[in-house]
Image (cartoon, rainbow, N blue to C red):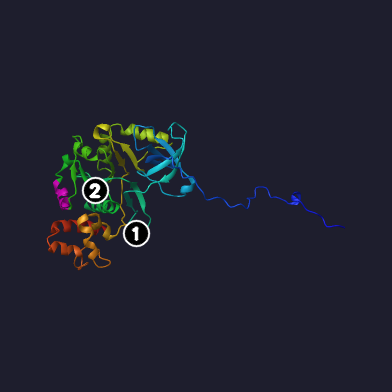
Amino acid sequence: MSPREYDESDVRVRPGRRGSRPRSKRRPDHADAAEAMVIAVDRGRWTCALGGDAARPPVVAMRARELGRTPVVVGDRVRLVGDLSGTVDTLARIVRVEERRTVLRRTADDTDPYERVVVANAEQLVIVTAVADPQPRTGFVDRCLVAAYAGGLAPILCLTKADLGDPEVFAAQYRDLDLPVLVTRRDREPTALAEVLGGRVSALVGHSGVGKSTLVNRLVPDAERAVGTVSAVGKGRHTTTAAIALPLPEELGGGWVVDTPGIRSFGLAHVTPDDVPAAFDDLADAIEDCPRGCGHLGPPADPECALDALVEEGRLRPARLAALRRVLVALR
């Protein structure tokens, strides 16, 4: 008997089995992707303002598969493709996250290695604290200052409820840091604060009860409507558990104010002692002469700190160094 001749019909192919052809790693470059700013995050959906323009309908987007688990937070500048009409039940895709210029981070506590990005690309950090009811705490303000310096944000101290006490008693502790201090009252409009925020992206942080929500409602007259619009688009309900960016009125020059949830703790596990003085142009070069591991606290902990030499040379005010070191204590 002659040997059997086989053809392709004799080869058994398993249904659903992947072929041997390698999957291509080429991805589209999305050169025509539209620029947008993330203004809210809700359960795997990101609400974005096209071109950072609050006048255009907000667009809801999902994260593209090729981004993997790339974190996307409020304030991020992203690139979108897909349906950008902003109509109900439409969904775009985030295909790229631009490099962040600034970032506000915190950890749950000082031992937690996991960083939580609160806001990206904010130019200013407004630290809101009340003069009374509740009483102001330097510890929280100091920690927020450290986070601002480390993240590249310009800090501003906003003292609320000045009608209940003298704000200068608390503000005097920060004058030597050249920190802008603004004062508001419940019976007056926050005009000075509005002028500082106009045309810029600013984040507000503060404990619950200090009057942060009151400020937001006065700065953004239609804040409740804006929050409702974003929530409806994102299929979620805005609460104080998530940050949200709200547009400032055009008469103030536009801009955005990012309302963050009330923070109980501000961990700084991600910050090093060098991050704080490095934020000041006149101190960044000086600390390069400090010994390795210097905490910049001065004697007896850091007897060879180069910042003391600046004081001796008359290039740094003793009061300013003392204020800076009080902030650095927050890292200890």
The residue at 24%/48% (across/down) is: 155
Q: Is residue 265 above or below residue 260?
A: below
The residue at 33%/46% (across/down) is: 119
Measure how far apart labels 1 and 2 are at the Cα level.
25 Å
| Lower position in the chain sequence, tag 1 or tag 2 | 1
Residue at disc 2, secondary structure? strand
- In depth, the one of 54 and 3 nearer the eye is 3
Q: Picture coordinates of residue 140 (x, y %)?
A: 25, 51
Amino acid bearing label 2 = Pro
Q: Which residues are magenta?
A: 168-176
Amino acid bearing label 1 = Thr
**Which residue is tagged 1?**
111
Q: Picture coordinates of residue 230 (x, y %)?
A: 38, 35
Q: Is residue 24 magenta?
A: no
Kindly tell me whether residue 311 is visible in this rendering.
Answer: yes
Q: Nearer the viewer, mark 1 or mark 2?
A: 2
Question: Tag count in the figure?
Answer: 2
- In depth, the one of 140 and 175 nearer the eye is 175
Q: Residues within 10 Å of mark 1 (few under 14, many from 20)?
A: few
Query: Which mark identifies residue 271?
Result: none
Q: Answer whether labels 1 and 2 touch (C-beta < 8 Å).
A: no
Quarter of the image with the N terminus is bottom right
**Which residue is tagged 2?**
155
